[in-house]
Image (cartoon, helix red, strand yellow):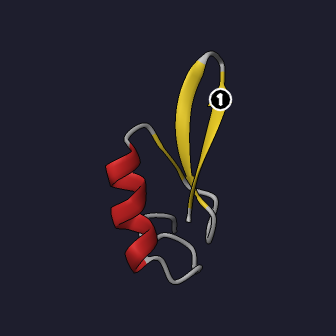
Amino acid sequence: MVVQTERDDTTWYECETCGLLFDEQSDATDHERMCDDSDPSYIQ
């Protein structure tokens, strides 16, 4: 489930699985559907 949160007067959408933040709810929902709770592949 995507969680809506407020930070710095901006609404963010957080993946409950890994904690990644998105500015668009649809992006967060798409990500969370495929999230496997491992580090994102772009972080080395």
In the rendered image, which quarter is residue 18 located in?
A: bottom right
Residue in the image at 49% along x and 69% along y? 40
Q: Secondary structure at mark 1?
A: strand
Give above or below for 26 relative to 17.
above
Residue of label 1: 6
The image position of residue 26, as x and y in percent, is 33, 51
Residue in the image at 54% along x and 37% along y? 12
Q: Is residue 2 left or right of residue 5?
A: left
Q: Is residue 3 left or right of residue 26?
A: right
Number of callouts: 1
The image position of residue 44, as x and y in percent, is 51, 68
In the rendered image, which quarter is residue 24 located in?
A: top left
**Quadrant of the frame with the N terminus:** bottom right
Residue in the image at 34% along x and 52% along y? 27
Foreground: 2 or 39?
Answer: 2
User: Label 1 crowding class (10 Å Cα cut-off): few <14, some 14-19, many 20+?
Assistant: few
Give above or below for 19 relative to 7.
below
Badge 1 amino acid: Glu
Residue in the image at 63% along x and 64% along y? 16
The image position of residue 5, as x and y in percent, is 64, 38
Q: Is residue 9 left or right of residue 42?
A: right
The image position of residue 23, as x and y in percent, is 43, 37
